[in-house]
Amino acid sequence: MAVYNKIQQKQMFVGKLDYDGDLLDQLTAICQKENISLGKVQAIGAVQKAKVGYYNQKTREYQLIEIDRNLEITNLCGNISLRDNKPMVHAHITLADKDGNAFGGHLVQGTIVFACEFIIHILAGPAYHRAHDENTGLPLWNI
Ligand code: ZN
């Protein structure tokens, strides 16, 4: 059965990331600096190149996909929770090339910002912690 809590929205951070910086690293640094234990992130913009993961459910490993060209971020959507007691951003991203072809996946390090506007929503507790999940092999919410 689905497990969930009713949670209030607390505050938002709205800003832009640095040109040439790593997309995931920059979002993670903000969440760690602000000590966010539960939240939501969304962003749009453009990247110089991208790297995303595809979780292979059979091997239980991420296969990495590198897209070495300039792309639009048509959507970045993710959540913030705690892994090993530190804020962790789990985000998925959809990108489009000059012909409008879309690519996407689990955001990993290696996606380099051209321009990026983000909104981080902080949610009131309880803090969500990630723990190993036997069924999937993934570090899922332990709620
Ligand atoms: Zn993911």
Image: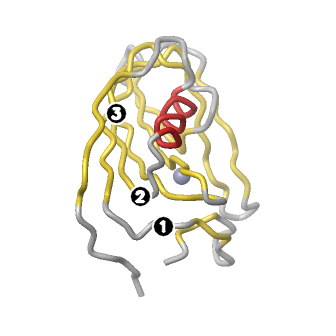
Mark sitting earlier along the chain (1/3) = 3
How far apart are the two marked residues, 1 and 3, measured between alpha carbons?
22 Å
Q: Which mark is residue 87?
A: none
Expressed as whole percent of the image width and height from the top left, the position of residue 86 reads 60, 53
Task: Say left or right for 65 vs 14.
Answer: right
Q: Residues within 10 Å of mark 3 (few under 14, many from 20)?
A: many
Q: Is residue 15 above or below residue 123?
A: above
Locate the N terminus by quadrant: bottom left
For marks 2 and 3, the one nearer the N-term is 2
Q: Position of residue 137 (x, y in %)?
A: 69, 68
Q: Secondary structure at mark 1?
A: loop
Dot 2: what SS? Answer: loop
Labelled pair 2, 1 in contact (Cβ < 8 Å)? yes
Q: Amino acid at mark 3?
A: Ala
Amino acid type, residue under disc 1 in the picture: Tyr
Which numbered tag is attached to residue 128? 1
Q: Are marks 2 and 3 in contact (CB under 8 Å)?
A: no
- Kindly report which numbered mark, 2 or 3, lies closer to the viewer in this rendering: 2
Q: Residue placed at 64% from the left, 77% from the top?
A: 135
Out of 75 and 5, give the one closest to the viewer. 5
Q: How far from the left and from the top, in percent, is residue 45? A: 35, 22
Q: Is mark 1 within 8 Å of ligand 1?
A: no
- Horizontal relation, residue 82 to residue 135: left or right: left
CA–CA distance in space, label 2 to label 1: 6 Å
Viewer-side residue, 116 vs 68: 116
The residue at which mark 3 appears reads as 43
How far across and how far down the image is residue 131, in percent?
Answer: 64, 70
Name the kind of residue labelled 2 in the image.
Leu
The residue at label 3 has a CB less than 8 Å from ligand 1: no
Instruction: Please tell me how crowded label 1 is: few (under 14), some (14-19), or many (20+) other residues with Cα within 10 Å.
Output: some
Where is mark 2, residue-wise? 38
